[in-house]
Amino acid sequence: MGNEGFRKNVLIPNRIDPASGKDSYWWIIQAIASDHQTPCNNLRRIVSYFYMNKITRRREEFFKFVWDHSADSFQAKFDKRRELTHSEISFLRNITGGLREKKSRPEISKLIKKELSVSEDDMMVLLLQLTGLTRTKIIGDLKASQDVKSSGIKVPNDYKRLHEGEIWNFAGPYLTDRFTAVFGPVARSSLDIAPSAESINQATYPGFIRQERAKRQGHEAELRLATLLLNAGIPFEPREKADNPMCKDATVAGVSFDIVIPSVSSPLLCFKATVHTANIGQYGESKDDLEIKEAKEKLDAKFGKKAPLIIALIDGNGFSSNRAGLDGVLCTADEFCQFRTLWKALVIAFDKLRTDNQKIRIILPAESAEDFSDFLKTYNMLSQITKTPPTKGKWRRIDAGDAEIYLLET
């Protein structure tokens, strides 16, 4: 492989020595080759050197621009819990009253069912949250119960139906025990339950909503990317992602992708998005790695040298706990971007769609302009970097992560 091949495919800084006119790749290759080992060993060492530098560079970039989810408005929607309503306090007060009256377990179960049935609001979801459960945990526990299996009673998939029919014979005692464990100490006090109930509400909500938040994080990445592409006038599929990020994905070569540019029938860029803000364990990260590798193999098999680029939209501190999966994704994907570097997706798209560069201007933070100079050169956009907004002509501004993108309107 010649210098030009390394320059195109390897992410390490390339510098020209003014004295000799040789670049860094030339000097590295000469240094490795000069030890007189066999050509095979030399080539292996060269490939290994550049591979490790590619991973190191990409990993450094990833953690330098990793998403601060704690300060993001998306996270705030899940972290901030509203106060309990009067009807919710009344619901809890009635059941706690049964505990204060020292009603039996079957009587409390019957009381809970009655309160759930007469309420016009979804009190079941409140009950699950305050007792330390989730919508999926109670369903899973009931389905796993040998007593439930032996009874032949079917467990509904919808938690809202648990107080309907015979399944309550098992769900009722289950919820009664959980409610008693949490509100029993409150019931033994003569004070009103409202302050304690509100404290429990605020304390249990982050854990209760965690699964929902994790599910929507990946879709939030798709939404932001789709919205950005739409605003920039870049064609993509599925178009519905800009309105409903949880819609069906696009399929190319039998592989599911979150977004494809410009279309499934003529793919140039295929995006896979994954965001992890907490430790997801080795399985989760290995899954991300394997999905990217499978996608790469199938695209290469179908399209050969004309295979579309795979772009990983990957972010979150969750990847810091197990680097193997992260390294796999960063190595296999042709390019990657994050929430803060979402502008990279536009740069690649502009290049592959052969957009007129004279109609594009990009403002980056000073440190980013230097960090991404090689990337910008690769996609013919370095000359479009500017420090101030363009003034001649009518330009439209688009915010893309840390960057400001300006598009000339004609």
Image (cartoon, rainbow, N blue to C red):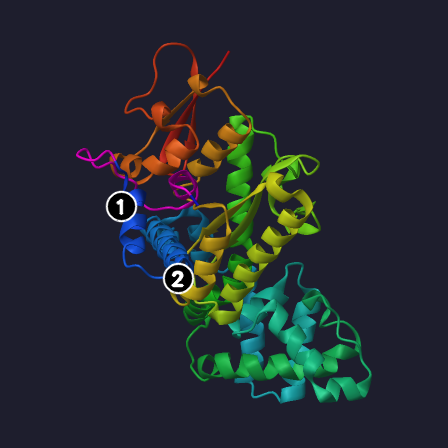
Q: Which mark is residue 154?
A: none
Report if residue 16 lies within the magenta region. yes
- Disc 2 target residue: 41
Asked if the residue under mark 1 is in contact with the one under mark 2, i.e. CB atoms within 8 Å, the reply is no
Tell me the magenta residue range. Answer: 2-21
Can the viewer see residue 347 in this picture? yes
Element assignment for label 2: helix
Quick check: 118 left or right of 383?
A: right
At 55% from the left and 53% from the top, the residue drawn is: 216
Q: Amino acid at mark 1?
A: Trp
SS assignment for the magenta stretch, majority: loop
Q: Nearer the viewer, residue 269 or 298?
A: 298
Q: Is 204 drawn above or below residue 3 in the view shown?
A: below
- Disc 1 target residue: 27
Element assignment for label 1: helix
Percent across and percent down for residue 96 are: 54, 77
Q: Nearer the viewer, mark 2 or mark 1?
A: 2
Percent across and percent down for residue 254 are: 71, 51
At 27% from the left and 46% from the top, the residue drawn is: 27
At 45% from the left and 48% from the top, the residue drawn is: 74
Q: Amino acid at mark 2?
A: Asn
| CA distance separating discs 2 and 1 | 18 Å
Q: Nearer the viewer, residue 136 or 257?
A: 257
Split into 4 quadrants, where in the image is the N terminus? top left
Q: Nearer the viewer, residue 335 or 216?
A: 335
Report if residue 12 lies within the magenta region. yes
Percent across and percent down for residue 299 are: 64, 48
- Number of residues whose C-alpha sits closer than 10 Å to that of mark 2, classed few (under 14), some (14–19) or many (20 or more): few
